[in-house]
Amino acid sequence: MKMILRWFPYGDDSVTLEQIKQTPGVSGVATCLPKIPVGEVWPLDVLEELKKEINEARLEMEVIESVNIHEDIKKGLPSRDNYINNYIKTIENLSKVGVKILCYNFMPVIDWARSELAHKLEDGSYAMAYRHDEVVKMNPSIMADVMAQKSRGYSLPGWEPERLEQMAADIEFYNNITTEEYWENMKYFLDAVIPYAEKHDIQMAIHPDDPPWPLYGLPKVITNAENIRKFLSLNSSKYNGLTLCTGSLGSNINNDMAEIIREFSGEGRVHFAHIRNLKHLSEKDFDESAHLSQCGDLDMFEIVKAFNDTDFDGYIRPDHGRMIWGEKARPGYGLYDRAIGANYILGLWEALEKMKKMK
Ligand code: CS2
Ligand code: MN
């Protein structure tokens, strides 16, 4: 198992590589090329530059999060083949710079949704929060909501007012296809790309839908064990795998995280883990929380044990942390709380490893 942190390049992150290097037990970063428009090939020379910068900080660049999927692929439009070819070229370039894991998601239009990016918790720290009724009101399809978005004083990343109209049109498109058709578009993508992932030894790792329930009539597919089973059977290669995000799947109270991890990590289909915790206020309302089990509803010992028992040898990163100690950073991606989370997970891992040897 390797512990990594997510890091955004080009000065777009308040956290530096030097700080990450000083975080005990962290061997590398999950990173991306945020400036390349979705659907275009990630150029080899740009990747080489980025790798050089990361390696000079004595960190590894073995995980990419994410190479986003062009909407035409998710929609199943004829233009998808061109974007799929670009994706394959990107996979080839990633392999040339030693990348091992490619994290992506197959969520239509919206990556993740929260009603608040800085919700004050009882201890005075700030975390992201999800209130279902609020998020429903943020439906980009309702044009009045453009004003609502502005009056909120912030928009979620990618939800800028000028993009809302395109989002509304995309939502309309998905409202008119069936979830089964959506699964078919996914299979088309996987069948085209996975042979190249195998050839270039890049493990594909899909991120679950966040939140894992329907929103704005959009198809949601990576939401629970049954659907993950279906996803993995669409293409049975081990290179067709998962980013197991405990916070995304775990926001559905019916998902038993340890059981899900045991099943899919046991089958060797989990390549990357995002570990975060959250506290439910009701079935579909939650606050993100510190990683420690007692701070949220997820049992971190059981989660880490499920990975350890199944001989997980992929990458783990702490997902969203709170904003603590006055830190100013991208929502979810401050240094302090994620560093605490990483070392808590590493502590559990060390104990589990030593217990195994004692038996
Ligand atoms: C991440 C996702 O910050 C987060 O919530 O877990 O945005 C993740 O990077 C993407 O869904 C992966 O494509
Ligand atoms: Mn995640």
Image: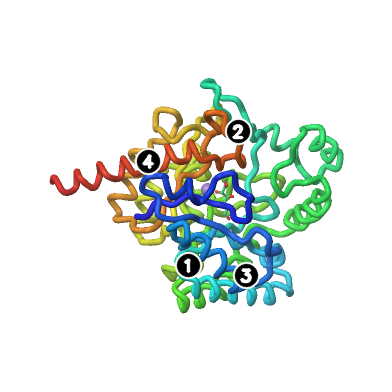
Decide: marks 2, 1 in contact (CB < 8 A)? no
Relative to residue 169, is residue 139 depicted above or below? above
Compute the Cα span from label 4 to label 1: 24 Å
Q: Which residue is mark 4?
A: 343
Checking the image for residue 214, the label placed there is none
Residue at 58%, 54% (x, y): give it: 221
Compute the Cα span from label 3 to label 2: 33 Å
Q: Between tags 4 and 2, which lies in front?
A: 4
Chain-order first, disc 3 or disc 2:
3
Among all residues in the image, which is located at the extreme left? Answer: 359
Q: What amino acid type should be assigned to the residue bearing mark 3?
A: Trp
| x and y percentages locating residue 227 in the rendered image | 51, 55
- Give SS at disc 3: loop
Q: What amino acid type should be assigned to the residue bearing mark 1?
A: Val
| x and y percentages locating residue 69 in the rendered image | 64, 63
Q: Is residue 76 left or right of residue 151?
A: left
Q: Residues within 10 Å of mark 2 (few under 14, many from 20)?
A: many
